Amino acid sequence: DLSNDDVSRGDHSRDVPLNGSDLSVFLFMLVMSVLTVCGNMVVIISIVVFQQLRTPTNFIILSLAVSDFLIGAIMMPLQCVLLVDTCLHHGKTLCPVYSFISMIVGTVSLYNVVLIAADRYFALCNPFGYAAKMTVRTTSVCISFGWCFSFCYNLIMMYVGSSERGEGNVICFRECAIPVSNTWGLIDLIFIFIVPCLSIILLYLRVLRVALKHAKAISNTVKLTASQQRKKSELKATKTLGSVVLVYLMCWIPWYTCLVNIESLPNPSVSITYLMCLFFSNSCINPVIYAISFPWFRKSLFFTLHKLAVDFTSSSSTITGATTTYCSLLCEGPWGWTTVCNCRTTECSYTVSGADKLDSERRNEEVVMMLRLIRPPFASTLILEIVRKSKHCSPHHINKLMLSHGLEISKQ
């Protein structure tokens, strides 16, 4: 422990080597930082680059990935620095910045998890209203509000609700926290911990009840209709995002509970260090959950690695390789569609469940509307080739519909 005399003399650095426990935490945090940055960067790139992934639910995942990326890029490296050198020089400036960023990111992460729970609730409990009201614009407004609220709330917390800090320009690890008055501590406990966590739990209990009901109905049906296929996709997304919510609560609740009762802990600094590892690990686990559950994440990861390894504009053979890589993404049909892809010949066949009940005009129009969502900028020729080779598309009608929707028609 560093005494006040040590701080006044300026001997603030760690004068002994890292012990085994600190070294293990340091290495764990370092590896986790790299994995968190890389994993969440893939999520961000995937949703930003691929237009077909820009759905309301994925925008919430994008916001959560940004906050997780900031934790991996800023918070974890700073934590590694504090493990090596336990005191921050120029701490009067650096410590508030460190604490402010950590509070913002923590609040935004919790807000995003609440949004995920609300999104799944409306998607399963009110599917018709969800499609009409839960648009990309509505989701973007909700996400923007969450970031702005987090920034303003924590700014007020720092400069209005904080207690007085002692003088000095060097602040050590256990002192690098924003002291909060009892009144603001109670407000923070209720509105930033209890209310959001209760909301998440209650929403997902309701979602679980509806999901089990839908799953039972689908399991009793031999041939699924398009509506049931959509419900099946929603159920799969609900299970995946439910895993994200569960893991987040498992990491968040112990962290916040110990912060509230920090004075009763036998060794507060050590406890906070290990709990911080648990809290930060949530940001690293989320991309793993996406990789296990979402095919688009695995495909986007493959494409991102391919793009890093190859220059798309270097040669015609490279272009061919790029279009082949894109084929599996281009052939990704919407809910209710069965897709057969042959990426070597860039052929994709789209069929609809209950296709005998739909006329060819309707099928063609649905294909074109899908292409408006998934078309990458440089692959209009490939798209048209795929559509024209589809067994369920009339080239004449496709050309007509593409013109009416302002899409380019290749003359090749």
Image: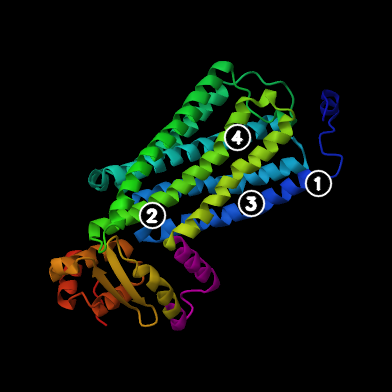
Does the residue at mark 4 contact the one at mark 1 (Cβ under 8 Å)?
Answer: no
Q: Can you say which quadrant of the picture contains the N terminus?
A: top right
Local crowd size for mark 3, using a 10 Å CA cut-off: few (<14), some (14–19), many (≥20): many
Q: Earlier in the sequence, mark 4 or mark 1?
A: 1
Position in image of residue 185 (x %, y %)? 56, 21
Q: Which residue is mark 2?
A: 236
- How many numbered marks are there? 4
Name the residue rendered at 64%, 39% in the picture. Answer: 276
The alpha-carbon separation of the residues under discs 1 and 3 comes to 18 Å
How busy is the neighbourhood of tag 1: few (under 14 within 10 Å), some, or many (20 plus)? few
Q: Is residue 196 left or right of residue 226?
A: right
Q: Residue tagged by mark 1?
A: 20
Distance Cα–Cα, label 2 vs label 4: 29 Å
Q: Which residue is found at the position 47% from the left and 68% from the top?
A: 303
Task: State the residue at coordinates (44%, 52%).
Answer: 240
Q: Point out the tag, 1 or 3, that comes first from the N-terminus.
A: 1
Disc 1 marks which amino acid?
Answer: Gly
Q: Name the kind of residue labelled 3 in the image.
A: Met
Residue labelled with disc 4: 255
**Element at badge 2?**
helix
Residue of label 3: 32
Instruction: Work out whether mark 3 precedes mark 2 in sequence or the reverse, and give the earlier one.
Output: 3
